[in-house]
Amino acid sequence: MGVINVTPDSFSDGGLCASTEDALRHAACLIEQGADWLDIGGESSRPGSMPVDMAEELRRVIPVVEALSSMDVPVSVDTSKPEVMRAAIRAGAAMINDVNALRAAGALEAVAAGGVSACLMHMQGEPGSMQADPRYDDVVAEVKGFLRQRLDAALAAGIQRDRLAIDPGFGFGKTHDHNIKLLRHLDRFSDLGVPVLVGLSRKAILGKMTGRNVGDRLHASVAAALMAVIKGAGIVRVHDVKATRDALAVYNAVNS
Ligand code: 7PJ
């Protein structure tokens, strides 16, 4: 899954795709590199970020989704707002990728009525404050318990199981040690019975491991994506599609 941030303040690519035109150019590039999904986001959810208002998020995201809906590659939209979900689905989105796991009032209903897929991600707290003091007794068990509850809520709302994915939410209300434990034990999420999606690309956890700044985390990101796949991830959300594809080609050739 290739990432397209239509935001002026994304930590990882700092406004690379601030306009619709730039976003479409980047999308074509990621498709060429072999992306199976494109994830379009109009609200930065990086630690410390502030929410954007709905009109602005719609203005950023919807034209890109509309333009991409005629392409062969399905589009997911990274949003927590039911209103944006509905507009994205009307514009042709095939999946809603919600860092808030469809907890906003009306979010489950928006996805169920739209008949699209959803990724349910774990986050402790909210982006503005989530890294202040994240705490768990047992991070793997607690994140897994939360995702099991959200899966049950999604199924009860009428979203089909084969339309759901889960994500432990690396960096979302977790310390460095919490993130490492989650990756080490990622295989424990497989028995929830839906694909596991993982986003580690260019994240601070990799900066801490390597001492590299955000512009220099390609190799660490590829290693992290490969490791996630070895531990059962079915979808990896990445900025660097070509390099990740190559790593997975080597893995798949040997593992088949
Ligand atoms: C994630 C995401 C992630 C899912 C972001 C960034 C911050 N969606 N949206 N999983 N991260 N499902 O790209 O580093 O880890 S935004």
Image: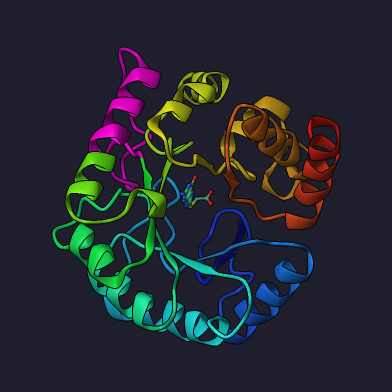
Position of residue 243 measured from the top left corner of the image (x, y, whole percent): 81, 50
User: Does the stretch in magenta take in 135?
Assistant: yes
**91 on left or right of 179:** left
Viewer-side residue, 86 vs 223: 86
The answer, for residue 56, to whether it is visible in the render is: no
Q: How many marks?
A: 0
Position of residue 24 measured from the top left corner of the image (x, y, whole percent): 63, 81
**127 on left or right of 205:** left
* Quadrant in which the N terminus appears: bottom right
* Quadrant in which the C terminus appears: top right
Residue at the extreme top of the image, as rendered: 137
Position of residue 198 measured from the top left corner of the image (x, y, whole percent): 54, 41
**86 on left or right of 206:** left
What's the residue at 49%, 79% (across, down)?
65
The answer, for residue 43, to whether it is visible in the render is: yes
Viewer-side residue, 98 vs 248: 248
**109 on left or right of 72:** left
Viewer-side residue, 26 vs 215: 26
Query: Considering only vertical position in the picture, is 172 above or below 49?
Result: above
What's the residue at 50%, 69% (across, down)?
7
Viewer-side residue, 254 vs 219: 254
What's the residue at 41%, 83% (across, down)?
91
User: Does the stretch in magenta take in 240?
Assistant: no
Residue at the extreme left of the image, as rendered: 105
* Colouring scheme, one of rainbow, by chain, secondary structure, one colour: rainbow
Position of residue 105 measured from the top left corner of the image (x, y, whole percent): 13, 58
Q: Which residues are magenta?
A: 122-149
Query: Considering only vertical position in the picture, is 10 above or below 135?
Result: below
The rendered magenta stretch, by its main secondary structure, is classed as loop
